[in-house]
Amino acid sequence: MTRRLLLSGLLLCTAGSLSAQERYELNSEWKSLPVKEVKMDGNRISLPATTLKNWEPATVPGTVLTTMLNNKQVPDPFYGMNNQKIPDIFYTGPEYYTRWFVRDFREMPPATDGQVWLHFRGVNDGCDIYLNGKKVNAARHYGAYLRQTYNITEFLAKDGHNRLAVIVYPPAVPGDPNGGQGGDGTIATNVGPQYTAGWDWIQPMRDRNTGIWDKVTIEKTGAVRILDPHVVTTVPGIRQPAGKQAPAIIHVEATLQNPTTNSISGKLKYELAGKSIQQDVTLAPKGVTKVVLPDLTLENPNLWWPAGYGPQNLYQLPLEFIRDGKVSDREEVEFGIREIQTTWNNHTRSREIQVNGQRIFIKGGNWITSDAMFRFSKERYDAEVRFHRDMNLNLIRIWGGSLTERPEFFEACDKYGLLVFQDFWMSGDCNGRWQDPKKKDDQWTRRQYPNDHGLFIESVADQVKMLRNYPSLAFWCGGNEITPPQDILAAMKDSIIPTLDGTRYFFDYSNSDSMSYNFIGGNGDGPYGIQTIAHFWEDRTFPFNSEVGSVGVGDITSLKRFLPKENLVAPDFASKSVDSVWDYHKYIGYNNSIDPYGKSKNLEDWANKAQLVNYDQYRALMEGFSAHMWDWYTGAIIWKTQNPWTALRGQMYDYYLDPNACLYGLHSGSKPLHAMYNPVEKIVMIVNNTFTYHRDLMLEINAYDMDGKQTPLGQLFVEATPSSVQKHVELKTLVDKLKAKKGIFLSLRLRNLKQEIIDDNCYWLPDENGNYSGLQEMTTVKPTITAIRKSGEVVVTVSNPTGGPLAFFNRISLLDAQSKERILPVFYSDNYITVLPGEKKEIVISGEKAATKNTVVEVFGHNVGKQLVEIK
């Protein structure tokens, strides 16, 4: 739960503040044309009086390909083989994707010494900027990550009618998209995303994401502007989420810029918890000065915790520069009070993470980017991060071949309690770790990529300033599976991050020995494909595995969104036959894991059985790591949990934000307090990832056959020690006997003293031959299903009658009543649920779109026919 705290005096406004700092985004009404179709230079294009005939609507923020797609000039590259129909920049040459973008806007020149600023948060890769017939940037801008700010006060038209014109140039070296990781690797000679030339989970983005891909804003200030405010919180001691807190220390500093030719005096200040903290400042003409405010000791602070451990309390800090009683500039900084530490665990030989003095077992997911074409939105970020919270994860790693993620992503992570492990822009593939026949240059050459080390270093410093206030940001990392070149690494590690941040641990690279000592050999991460359930429990892997994963195909509804009808063909493991479109969309094989469920009748049947595999794989993955918590492991990060393109692998939800069973297998296996069955030792264990003793827990163990007959296997009161895992009941003889012929269901439950179920975990175990023969013969049941709308949410109740089998593995979906298409995104408190005979389960559907009118609920399961339920 996130609480935004408005403390005494927090939002007091000084006289004149309403007319001070204002900011707005230029995010609509842009026009564009390819450079080859424009016969004027930037000076003339940017004159408001110049008529622009036949210019096309443009999408900003967005890539060139996004504009072309929205103008129906290219097909959807996420569907079928459409991406092959789009010309690739490697073959067209850069001019094809070089493009002008123009935006008219109203802004009067400010009175007296007011200032107006133009901000670009991300342009890939180069650009020249013109305003009202004049060039704004003295030298061409380069660098996909480097923000740009220009004082445009003197450029503004006296009548307030202004025209901004930007010519955007693609990356200087787009790379050959030859099927390698990052194509031929030369994409990494630029300071920009590497995946755009293709990877083993995505096809190349044909324009290499050229464009004004992030926000463009206009900001108005007084004579002095506040830059890069920095809030650092110190939380001494070992804390608990509940109860009164010892004080925390709040340290605030910022840079002030005076663009005028006059010396200016004033004060930098903020108010928090009824206290006013301020510092008198005198700024030299054209001066830029760093100002450190006195520290604030905050009594009884409301702390920020990772998901599953405590609340995500957030504060608002209004930082103002006051001159002559008026606000010259005001920056609101949202921050959380927490402190992140790391220690080396000598037993596991891996990095151990502490937050507010308490150690956290890391259950993480790897993230590429929200959308492969950089079509970002606050709403999509919120939904995707919420899915990660719902998986009961506590960390997201941002993989190094893509971006430093956007502020809106970090805002969502702050809200939902996801720690962030942020890689910088290197990969072992492109930057020379391995020999690779797909690469143009040898390892020695690639080891020195990018071409412009200074730009890389400057971009790192800029991104650190942009992101350092977010409490969710926990770690910096030099790159994916390799460090940057030595001079870049030294600048980052010894200068930039200690000076500009100084609060976060820096990993040299994502699977370095400083994170996880490699005593096994090989790469230090993985594996990535499907594994046996026993493997997750009995085979020891890297002690803090930065990338480990499995499969992730969606169900038939998901597949139909991007596969043409003629390509809706189930993969055949026996004949190793995979449809060409599946192959193009990077299908990773399920091997023979579908076969134990019986021969698939069609693709829908295959995809439904794949969900059983999905659930089992990811539940076992996280349970297996948790079973060896603090003994073998200090954490694990799944490769990967989300999908920026329509790939057929490694995803808990598809590109369209439709969850599959992977998500709910993780949701179960990652619960903070959880009863689980070790299939190797045949023993029931309880893991407690909280800081609290849980006493008087009733552990209930029951087996059910395929007809629903119950066999009690044990019932006992147990306790769960904080941050630990314990073994309780050995079941080998009983389980082996019961499951021999047709398999069984094994139900594990934890109840509190009120007899409320606080954990419910149901396994389906195969027969003695490893087949799910009983599941193939299950009798159909017809549960009673109701759906009621309550306060914008939908409560679905599935009631299974007595005297029959379990209602097994039921998918619940919210549908549009007319089209019968799924409403996306919405969030389910659980899904792919199993209901025991004579019992019921309640599922809550939430999220903004859950309140959509004219909807129905669809339910179907392994032995439950499809039902559409009217919402009352």
Image: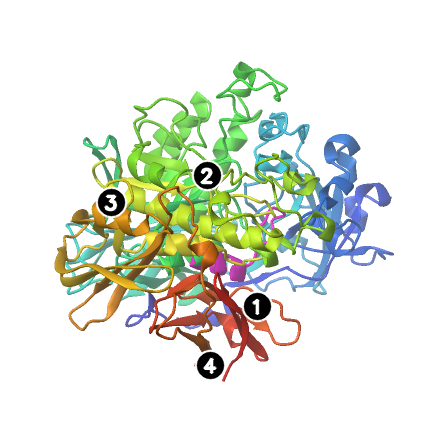
Magenta span includes 376: yes
Q: Which mark is residue 823?
A: 1
Considering the numbered disc 3 on the image, is that residue within a helix, a strand or a loop? loop
Q: Disc 2 vs disc 4: which is toward the camera? A: 2
Label 3 sits on residue? 682
Question: What is the spatial separation of the Cα atoms under label 4 and label 3, in whole angstroms?
Answer: 42 Å
As drawn, the label of residue 789 is: 4
Circle 2 Cα neighbour tier, 10 Å, few/some/many (<14 / 14–19 / ≥20): many
Please, what is the three-letter code of the amino acid marked with disc 3?
Lys
Q: Mark 1 Cα within 10 Å, few/some/many (few <14, many 20+)? A: some
The amino acid type of the residue labelled 4 equals: Arg
> Which SS class for mark 4?
strand
Nearer mark to the viewer, of 1 and 3: 3
Segment colored magenta: 371-386
> Looking at the image, which is closer to me, 468 or 179?
179
Q: Earlier in the sequence, mark 3 or mark 2?
A: 2
